[in-house]
Image (spheres, rainbow, N blue to C red):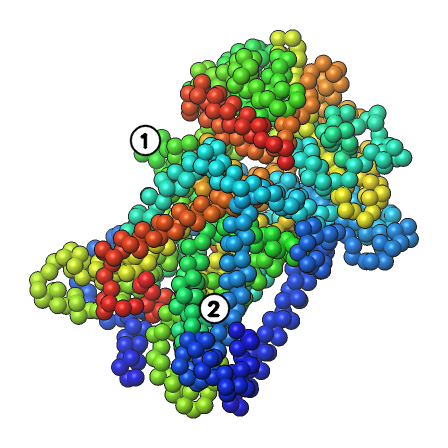
Amino acid sequence: MTDGVLPARTGRSTRPLLASLVGVNTMMQARDALWGYVFLLPWIIGLVVFFLGPIILSFLLSFTKYDVITPPQFVGLANYETAFTGDDLFWPSLWRTFEYSIVVVPVGLFGSLLLALMLNRGLPGTGFFRTAFFLSTLTPAVALALLWSWILNPDIGPINVALRAIGIPGPGWLADVHWALPSVILINLWGSMGGNTMLIFLAGLQGVPQELYEAAAIDGASGWARFRHVTLPMISPTFFFNLVLGVIGALKVFTTAFVVTGGNGGPNYALWFFALHIYQQAFSFFKMGYASALAWIFVVILLAFTYFQVVLSRRWVYYAGGDE
Amino acid sequence: MADQVVTRRRVLKAIGLFAVVTPVLAACGGGSTGGGGTAAPSGGSASAPTAAATSAPAAQANPAGGNVSLSISVYPDRPWMKTKAQEWADKNGVRLRVDDIAYADMNTKQLTELATGTMQDVVFSGNKWIRYTAFKGAFRPIDDYVKTKPYDKEDIIPSAITGGTFEGKLYGLPYEWNPGNINVVMYNKDMVQQKGVNEPTDSWTHDQFTEWAAKMTDSAKGVYGTDLWPGTYYDFGDLVRDYGGDVMSDDGKKFLFGTDPLNRQIAQWVTELRTKLKVAPPRAMMSQEQIFPSGKVASTCTNAVSVKSTIKQIGNKFKWGVVLGPTGPEGLRGYDSFAALWSIYIKSKFPEQAYDLILYLTSRDTALYALMKDGQVPARISVWRDPEANKETDIFKRVADWISDGKSKGPFPIPDNLRYTELETAFENNAFPMFYGEVDFATGLQKTQEACQKVMDQPRG
Amino acid sequence: MAMSEKVFAERAARAVGVGRRRGVGDLLLYVPLIIFAIIFVFPFFWSVSSSLKPPDEILSFPPTLLPSVPRWSNYVRVFERAPFARWILNTIIVVVLATLGAVLSSSLVAYSFARFRYRGRDLLFMITLGTMMLPAQVTLIPQYILWSKLGFVNTLLPLFVPQWFGGGAFNIFLLRQFILTIPREFDEAAIIDGASRFHIFRAILLPLCVPALMTVVIISFIANWDDYLTPLVYLNSEMQYTLALGLSLFKNYPETGGEPLQHLLMAASVMTILPPVLLFFIAQRYFVQGIVMSGIKG
C-alpha cells in the first residue's frame, strides 16, 4: 500500500491502473482510496501481526509437539486424534461449556431485555436504576469472583445465612460438585445482565419509531400485542446481535471459573470449561502443540455456532428498510 | 494541496510520537526486570540468549575484578530471602537484582523464563518441579562446585538433597524441608478434657486414631473428630507408607492407587471417615478457613511447619496439644520429604558467585535467621533440634528424631516422566469426590487409577 | 441535510429519555426495578461492609450487616501486605496507554471504513468483525511466542501495544456505525473548502464523535482494567503485576502470623472496583449516548 503512494503523487500515466487497482474510477477517487488505506494501516498491521499471523502459526503448531523450550516436532494429526479419542477431559469440558451456555445465553438475553424494557419507560429515576444495574458489569472479573465466593460462603455467607433463617439448609455452592456450575452461572449472569447487552437493547428499543406504537394503539392492540407485534420484530436485529455476541462470550467462559477454583477447575472438574482446558494444556502442562489443536477445534465450533445463527436468523430477524 | 502537506506532517508527527513513546515505555516496562525490556531482540532465533544479568558488558570481560552482578528470584512473603541475599551481595561487592515471584506460580513462570532466556541467576524451586525444569535444561549441575566448596553434609537433611538430584546430578541446595502435609496432629485439649478421652501420644496407630476421632466427634454440636484429608497423591502415599506400601511403584511408572490391595484398603478407610463413620467434615466445611482454630474439629492433621502459625490462630481460644501422626501396625510412619531449593540458571555468567550466594543462603546462620524472622523451617536437622525452634512446642525435635531413625519411607514420590502437575490435577479432581462420598467408591477408585496411570504413561517432558 | 440533522437530534434526545408519556401502570414498575436494583447493589454493599470489619468480626456467626466500628486501617494494611501501590501504578500505565492507543487507532480505522471507498474494504470489514469471534486462546499461544522471542515477556508491553494497532474490532465497529450516522454533507462541505481528509477527520468528525469516543474510552478502560488472561500469561514477577492479577495472587497469600485475609481481600477488591465505577459515573451520559446513537442493531 505504501508503494502505491508514490505513483499517486507523480505518475499521470499510472492513473487508470492505480484507480483500477484500488477499485475506483477516477484519479480523484483513487487518491481518496489511498488515504483510506493509510488510515487503515494500523489495523492492517494489527490484523496481520496479532490475528492472521498467530492464527496461521497456531494452525501449524497444532500438528506439532511443542513445549516452547525445545523446537517443535511434527506429529501429523496426532494432536487431533488425541483430542477426540484419547483425552478424557475433552468431551466433558466441551459438554460442560455447552451446559453453561445453554443456561447463561437465554437467561442473560431475556433478563437484559427485561431490564431494558423497564428502563425504556423513561420513568423518573431511570438514570439511577440504569447505573445500579450497570455497576455489576464494571466489576473486574477477578473481584467479581472473589466477592461472590465470599457471598456464597457455605457457612457465613449472607445467602446461606438468609436461607438458614427461613429453615432451608443452603448448598455448598462453589464447593459442591453439583452446585459449582450453577454458582458460576449465577455469578456471571449477575455480572453481565445489566451491562452492555442491556444498553444495546435499550438502544434498539429507543430506535423503534413511536408512530408504530401509536398506530398499534389506534388499532386497539393490547400491551402484550404491541410488544409481540411491534417491539419484538423491530428489535429483532438487536436481539440477533446480542445473541451472537452472547453465545460467543458464553462459550469462551474462563476467568470466573479460573479464579474461584484457583485454576484447577474443581471440584471434580465441575468448572473445567473448554477455555480452561486449553489454558491448562498450554500454560500449566506446556503442551503448546496440543493446546493449539484444541484452540482450532474451538474456532471451528464457534464458527459453526455463528454460521447456524446467521442462517437461522433469516427466519426471524426483521430488517426495517431492508438494507443495513 | 498546501493543506495536505501540513496533514502529512501531522501524521508523521503522530507516528513519531508513537515511535518515541514506545521505547520509553519499553524501558519503563522492563525496568525492574533488567533483562526483559532493555535486552536486544535476538531476531527470532529459537533460543533467545538474552541472559538475565548482563547489565554491564565489562563485567563479562572481567569477572574477577569484583564487577559481578547477579539476579535472584525470591518469594514476596519471605523477607529473609531478600535481606540475606542483599547482605551477601553487600559483603562481596556484588550488584544484585531481586525479582519477586509467587511460590505457587514458580513452576510455570520458571518455564516461561527459560523459554525467553530471562531466568534469574539464582532461582528457587521445589522438589516437585525441580527435576522437570532440570530435564528441560534450565539448571547448571553444582556437583563440581560441591567438590571444591562442600555444603554442610553433616547437617543438611539427606532426603532434601535427594530431592534436588536428577539422573545422578545435583541441581540445588535446600533452604526448606518438611515431612509432608498430614504427618503431625494438633488437637484441642479443652475438648479432650470435656469428653474425658485420653490424649493421643506419639506412638498411636491408625486404629487408635480412628477410635479417638470417633470419640471426639460430637454430631449434636456439629464438631468432627478430625479433618484428615489427603489433598495430594503424595499425602495419600504417606498413609500407605505407614503400612510399608506406596502410592506408586519405585521406578515411578505405575500408579498403585486402584491396583494394589493395600492402597485400596487405605482409600476405603479415608473415604469411610466421612461416609460411614462421619468423624470428618464434608466438603462444604472443609472448604472453609481455619476450622480447627474456630473449634469445628477436635484435631487437625497438618504439616509440622504449619504448627506455629496455627498456634497463633488459636490464640487464647483453647488449650492445644500436638503429636506425631499415627503409625501403621508395625510402627512405621511414612512421609514425603519435601524440600525447596536454590538452583543456578544454566546461562548464568557468574555460576561460581551464584554458588557462593546459595551456600550463604543455606548456611546455619541464615537458617536460624529465617526461622526467627519468617518462621521458615530449614533443611537442617540441627535447626529442627534447636531450642529456639522448640520453644512453644518440641514437635520439631520429635520430628527430627522420627525421621533420623531411618525406618520409615520418605523420598518424595515423583512420576518417572516428571509430569507432576498433571498427575496432581488428575488425582485431585478424581479422588476428592470419592473421598467425600460424592461418587461411588469403586467407580472413584477406578477413575482415579485410570486418569493417573494415563498421565504416568505419557513420555517424559 | 436539515432532515438528517433533525433525525440526529431526535435520537440524541431519546437517548437521554426525553418526551415519554406515562400511565398509572408505570408506577407498579418501580417494584421490580427496586428489587433488581437491590440484587445488583447488595454484593457491593456486602463487600464494602466486609472490608471495614475487624478480622474476628468478619468470621463471626451470624454475620453482621454493618461493621460494629468501621476499621479503615484495613485499607492501609492492604498496602502493607502486598505491593498494592505498585500494582495500581502498573495498571494505570497499561490502562492509559491501551486506552489512548485504542481510541486513536480505532477512530482512524473506523473513519477509513466509514468514509472511503476502496478495493477490499468490505471484505476487510467482515474480517474485522470475524476477529470478535476468535477465542483469545487461538492467538494467545503464537502471540506469546512472538513476545517471548522479542524478549518482552514480563514487561507491560504485550498488554497495551496491540491496542495501538486498530484498538479491537468492537471499537472499530462502534465508531464506524457512529460515523455513518453523521451526515456526509459535513465532509463534503469541508472538501469543497479545500480541507484535507485528515483535517476533516480531526476537525469535523472527531468532535462530533465525542459520545462514541467516550464509549470507546470506557469500554477500553474497563476491558484493560479488567483483563486477567493477558497479564496472567505475560507477567512473571510480582512487581510487574497489574491489579487484576495481583488480586488473585493476594487471595493465595499465606496467612502470616495467623492474620486472616478475608477482610483485606474485600478491601483490595473494593479498591479494584472503584476506578471503573468512578469513570462510569463521570462519563455515563456520553457512554449511553454513544451506544444508543451508533445504532448498533446487527
Q: Nearer the viewer, residue B433 or A155?
A: B433
Residue at 48% across / 20% down in the picture?
B445
Counting from the top left corner in percent of width and height, residue A9 is at 53, 85
Chain ID, mark 2: C
Asked if residue B154 shows in the view, the reply is yes
Q: CA distance from mark 2 to mark 1?
A: 55 Å
Write down the residue under mark 1. A167
Q: Is residue B229 above or below residue C263?
A: above
- Residue drawn at x 76%, y 35% as measured from the top left: B171
Q: Nearer the viewer, residue C64 or A177?
A: A177
SS under mark 1: loop
Tell me the amino acid under the disc marked 2: Ser
Q: x, y percentage for residue A315?
A: 22, 55
Specify the quadrant of the image occupied by residue B314.
Answer: top right
Left or right of residue B273, residue B332 in this image:
right
In the rendered image, residue A82, in percent from the top left (x then y), is placed at: 49, 36
Residue at the spot x=44%, y=80% of the render?
A19
What residue is shown with label 2? C106
Task: Specify the farthest residue to the top.
Answer: B330
Residue B27 coordinates in the image, percent (x, y):
68, 62
- Quarter in which the C terminus of chain B is drawn: top right
Q: Can you say whether B137 is above or below B192 in the image?
A: below
| Tag in front: 2 or 1 | 2
User: Do discs 2 and 1 belong to a common subunit?
Assistant: no
SS at badge 2? helix
Q: In percent of the image, x 36 and y 66: which residue is there?
A: C291
**Parent chain of label 1:** A
